[in-house]
Image (cartoon, coloured by chain):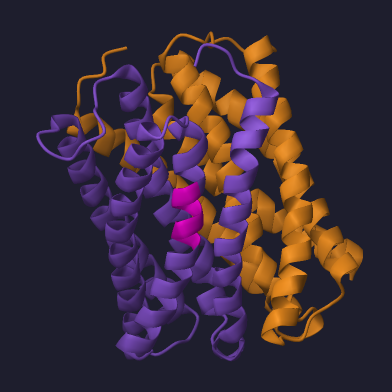
Amino acid sequence: MAREINIHAIVVQGLSILLLCAIIELGAGKVFEGMQEYFTTIMPGLIVMVPALLGLRGNINGALASRLGTGLNAGLIKPRLEMSTEVKVNLASSLILSLIASATIGVFAFGMNLLTGASTIGVLELMAIAILAGFLSGLILAFLTVFVAIVAYARGLDPDNVTSPTMASIGDFVTIACIYLAVLLVV
Amino acid sequence: MAVYGIKRIVLESYPILVTCILIALAAGYMLNSSIAEIAELPLILMMIPPINGMGGNIGSILGARLTSALHLGTLEPRLRGQRVLRGNVSASALISFAIFSLFGALFFAIAYSSGIPVARSFSLALAFFIAGMTLSAALIFVTIASAFVSFKGGLDPDNVVIPIVTAIGDVLGVTCLMLAIKIVGV
């Protein structure tokens, strides 16, 4: 894998993947817009968690994608769809992080609302929504990330250009859908 | 870097995640305090995942490329005389311009077709474009800084750069968007 700097390749690969991402982000935006009532009236304080939950996906899966990209480029991970030890360790770490970070978000968001005097639903409701949405989306996305990274590399695409952005956008969509689902279950 | 360990990944990542959560909660607070504008113009909600997402994407493509280059030794953590760095930054700037122009046009179409008058639709689209370009410039800077600092500090930049860039992207994205909407006067 040549690592000579090639602006043309970065722009072409980056831009085509970003166009795909743009469509997915718009879909996520549409779902988000549809939840307007939950944010403005039904569940005050809920919107405070949303950037953190969305960010979490980028953080955990983006880091997973980045590690896999480095691992593939450096030859530590073989570009085959198999549960090698390296892949298992990366997956397990992501899932553990999803769980504890989601719980943290619920608690901190409640604290934030108390501190700023914003009206808020209870800490247990916030935590339940955060954990449900965070872990469910984490589970779906961790497996998808491994799949996309390995397939992209096997097809000769640089996973650094492809995996992180694709997964971040799919992540936003899946996370917003999971937040919606969690809200419906908890409300 | 030859072996991955669950303990190393979790222990290195969790403090960064908590930092990111705290930063992201600031973005959440920003949203919560703009809840009246959002209730009046729900289209603003639709703009949030795109601006955060695309900002994060542009930063994380650059971040992933820089961290791989650092690991492989084709890039050194300093600013002067770095061909690889210059090339990557130009590519990111080009991509940002293309993607936020496109999004501006798309939001104009969406706003106009949902019954918002031409002038206001145009202002909304312009606000999105300005917010996006400001965000990209800031994120390119943050990405380079966090990649170099973490690499020099002996941390694996793969575990550090992307989380920081996406979290800062979330706060800056929401902030840039709300500010641009106010400045353009939608």
Question: Would you place residue B17 above or below residue B169 in this image?
Answer: above
In the displayed structure, does residue B133 sit left or right of residue A42? left
Question: Would you place residue B178 above or below residue A31 in this image?
Answer: below
Question: Would you place residue B69 above or below residue B150 in this image?
Answer: above
Query: Which quadrant of the structure image shows residue B26?
Result: bottom right
The majority secondary structure of the magenta stretch comes to: helix
In the displayed structure, does residue A74 sit left or right of residue A81? left
The magenta stretch spans which residues? Answer: B164-170
Question: Would you place residue A54 above or below residue B184 in this image?
Answer: above
Q: Outermost residue, front direction?
A: B153
Q: Please provide percent x and percent y for residue A31.
A: 65, 64
- The colour of chain A is orange
Query: Which quadrant of the structure image shows residue A124?
Result: bottom right
Chain identifier of the purple chain: B
On whether residue B167 falls in the magenta region, the answer is yes
Q: Please provide percent x and percent y for residue B4.
A: 60, 18
